[in-house]
Image: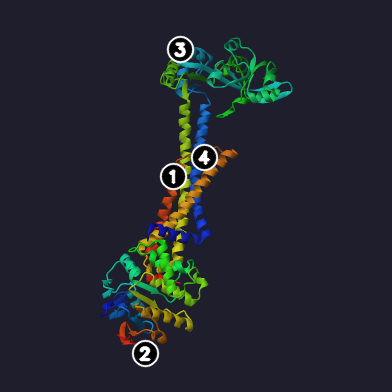
Amino acid sequence: MSLWRTFKVAWEGLTLNKVRSFLTTLGVIIGVAAVIVMMAVSAGAEAEIADQINALGANLIMVMPSFSRAGFGRGMSMGPGRMPGLTYDDIGVIAQNVTGINGVSAERVTNQTIKAGNTTLEDVPVVGTTSGFPQVREYRLAVGRFLTDEDNDRARKIAVLGYDLAQELFGDSSAAIGQAIKIGSVKFTVVGVMAPKGVVGNTDYDGRVYIPITVVFKKFTPARFGGNNVGIIYVSAESKEVMKDVMEQVTKVLVQAHDVDPSSPDFSLMTQDSIIEARASTTATFRNLLAWVAGVSLIVGGIGIMNIMLVSVTERTREIGLRQALGARPRDLQLQFLLEAVMLSLAGGLVGVLAGVGGSYVFNALGTMRTALVPASIPLAFGAAALVGIFFGYYPATRAARLDPIEALRRE
Amino acid sequence: MAEHIIEIRDLTRVYGTGETAVHALRGINLTVEKGEFVAVMGPSGSGKSTLMNILGCLDRPTSGTYVLDGEDVSRLGRNQLAGVRNRKIGFVFQSYNLLPRLTAARNVMLPLLYNSHQRLSDEECYRRAVAVLELVGLGDRIHHKPNQLSGGQQQRVAIARALVNNPSIILADEPTGNLDTKSSHEIMALLQQLHQQGATIVMVTHEPDIGDYAERVLHLLDGQIASDRLNGARRRAI
């Protein structure tokens, strides 16, 4: 029998019991949709992480204090009064001695109570920083001005508010300018409000206050607790190409300035790339796990097809016997039942692709979770469904082909 | 000069081996000529069904030869036997064996679809199916499904299906077993009409009055031909 005619016979077989055929494909539909949605979810998670890390600032190098055992050991032999870690002076050292950079800034964060008029906010992150901060973090000002070098030199008691904080305290960004706020027990004047930036990583930029870092040292961090140590130094390189060179220079000048062993310095360098890499390996594990779960559901769907095909072969034993008597060869029957299984799985694959693509879109639109459709997942899932049909249809089809016509015709 | 359609020599069929072996056929010699109408009779267990299965190429003999329409089919493989069944044999079963979801015409078309020697278009298949349905007197039931037809009409559809590929021989296994007397005689009249038009028919039955429609009656007993006689009442003029 020709392929097209066998196809039509197989189609008739499927339409004989539509509800059963649909329920059988449901397993494959769920499997295929799961593969596509899972891949979209993990791709969405990866994109989210990449976005967040890129939002830290372009070509950014982060210098952080590292209190390794070796670092402390070396610290003992340092000059008098020298504590391990990064200091305010390091900002100047980098700015003056390293070439190929756009800007340097630093952070020293302390949590304080803020009062403005009748409003009191507890535990607000107060960020001591320098003039370079907006540049290195790609952070824009909404109104007023940011901190200048002069503000730091003179330790002026001025503050720049995060966007949400300004709204909360004064109702409006412009209204905040020139107002007085109390941070801890110290009075500050608001000189600027930052544009909204949102949450990056674990930091809510819009809920913070930015003041000169020198004021933090003087008013909020007593010398015995690490005095004028900074929490982190940000260096932004001119381009991606000079990143490596800048990192080498920074390491060299800081090793010199701190007088530490180059093999175990008291600081460490990080870039977005190294963070992305670390996070990517976590998400890759996550993604592989999801892919396996989805793949298993596809196999379960295939077993469902095999089960129903075996039932179908048994039910139609007499019909198979008749077809044999009328001249159907074993391979005609094998093809007929194989096509039935493949059509079930392909129909399931098609609906599953639609459901998967639709599902990914809906998740994204509802904001439940970010998804990014992986184009390759569609042919992958569809192809897997077809393979499942062939694989799990082969055994029932072979059984149909091997039936003895005399026995089959005798069956009621 | 007569042309042999069936030529069987020393045919045996043994089921199982050793102590439990069942000898269903013990050396059958039989020649059926073109245009003959043969009834095979005998009690149950006499080997009628086994003989019909072998004649129908659904089963193979344990030993001996079976030449069907000039072709030795006793040693063919499953695929080749399927082709022989399709081209040379038309089956009529006791329980009609129509596919309930297909119309009369679609049921009759089935053997044409499996005919790999003659690739006919769908239109041609349909045309031929309608032609044989008209031949068996069902020209007005072409689009009826089996459950819309009486038993006699269903058996006519089955006979049309047996005829559609122009087979060398029609094998009818208790063709009237499920029918009332009136329908039985109508079906037998139809078979006899086909016989008069030149069809070769071998029919199994256990009803003597049905056997009387044939021109030659074989009696099987214990796997052997006990008697082979021309039916006096309906003796063919040669």
Q: In the image, is A11 to the left or to the right of B20?
A: right
- Which mark, by number, is residue A41? 4
How far apart are the two marked residues, 1 and 2, measured between alpha carbons? Answer: 74 Å
- Which mark, by number, is residue B233? 2
Q: Is residue B54 visible?
A: yes
Query: Disc 2 residue type?
Result: Ala
Residue B79 against residue A267 in the figure, above or below: below
Name the residue furthest right.
A118
**Image depth: mark 1 or mark 3 in front:** 1
How far apart are the two marked residues, 3 and 4, measured between alpha carbons? Answer: 45 Å
Residue A36 horizontal/vertical position (percent):
49, 43
Q: Are marks 2 and 3 in contact (CB under 8 Å)?
A: no
How far apart are the two marked residues, 1 and 3, measured between alpha carbons? Answer: 53 Å
Q: Secondary structure at mark 3?
A: helix
How far apart are the two marked residues, 2 and 3, measured between alpha carbons? Answer: 128 Å
Q: A50 or A394, which lies in front? A: A394
